[in-house]
Image (spheres, rainbow, N blue to C red):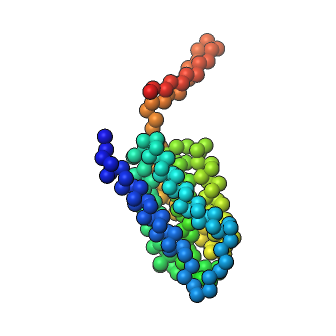
């Protein structure tokens, strides 16, 4: 059994990264633009989707997956903010020069891609819908253009290729056999 300290470290790391991401997304210009409902919802999804993803991994006892998620998120944030600092592309609303790539988009697409690769496409559909909404909210709020959002999605999805592996459910088995025109599909679940 793993210690309490080692199982909470990924949660602490992700919380710190999300806090940093939200703080960095705040507008620093002298004239603050009005924040619309779409942008507010996108900001909520920025925090809620990764937290729910990591929390779900812990709930089902997938500590290996939680570490994979955390390592992928660290890479996603490092690449995203490295490019933001290196490129200095002005935002469409001219509030600052942190437009490329979209940090919101890279973070939420990392979460959706993790669910897809680790647990399967069917489980990832709601996450992809939320990630797509967040990306659209960044364009709608004039914080990013389509290139920023596409680059953010590519970074988030790409980090999963490095760290995330398929979840092996050792307690479930699906079998199929056929013979003499008879077909048998079996499913077993070990408690």
Q: Position of residue 58 (x, y in %)?
A: 44, 46
Residue 132 image position (x, y, % from top left)? 64, 59
Q: Is residue 72 above or below residue 28?
A: above
Q: Residue at x 66, y 60 (%)?
A: 133
Query: Which residue is rendered at x = 63% and y = 67% of the image?
Result: 40
Up-down relation of residue 9 to residue 182 (above or below)? below
- Residue 168, quarter of picture: top left
| Count of numbered circles in the view | 0
Nearer the observer, 122 or 44:
44
Q: Quadrant of the C terminus?
A: top left
- Quadrant containing the N terminus in the rendered view: top left
Whether residue 53 sits left or right of residue 10 in the image: it is right
Q: Is residue 89 visible?
A: no
Residue farthest top in this picture: 180
- Decide which of 2, 98 is in the foreground and name it: 2
Name which residue lies at 57% across and 76% down: 99
Question: Is residue 27 in sight in this rendering?
Answer: yes
Residue 67 shown left or right of residue 174 in the figure? left
Residue at the image position 56 percent from the left and 62 percent from the top: 46
Q: Position of residue 173 (x, y in %)?
A: 49, 28
In front of the other: 85 or 18? 18
Residue 15, image x, y percentages: 44, 61
């Amino acid at each position: 059994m793993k210690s309490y300290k080692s199982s909470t470290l990924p949660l602490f790391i992700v919380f710190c990264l999300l806090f940093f991401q939200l703080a960095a997304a705040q507008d620093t210009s002298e004239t603050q633009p009005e924040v619309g409902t779409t942008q507010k919802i996108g900001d909520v999804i920025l925090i809620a989707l990764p937290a729910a993803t990591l929390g779900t991994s812990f709930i089902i006892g997938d500590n290996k997956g939680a570490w994979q998620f955390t390592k992928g998120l660290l890479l996603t944030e490092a690449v995203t903010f490295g490019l933001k600092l290196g490129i200095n592309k002005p935002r469409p609303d001219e509030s600052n020069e942190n437009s490329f790539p979209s940090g919101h988009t890279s973070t939420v697409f990392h979460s959706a891609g993790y669910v897809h690769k680790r647990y399967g496409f069917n489980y990832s559909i709601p996450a992809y819908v939320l990630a797509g909404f967040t990306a659209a909210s960044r364009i709608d709020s004039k914080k990013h253009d389509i290139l920023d959002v596409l680059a953010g999605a590519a970074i988030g999805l790409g980090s999963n290729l490095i760290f995330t592996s398929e979840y092996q459910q050792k307690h479930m088995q699906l079998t199929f056999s056929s013979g003499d025109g008879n077909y048998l599909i079996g499913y077993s679940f070990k408690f």
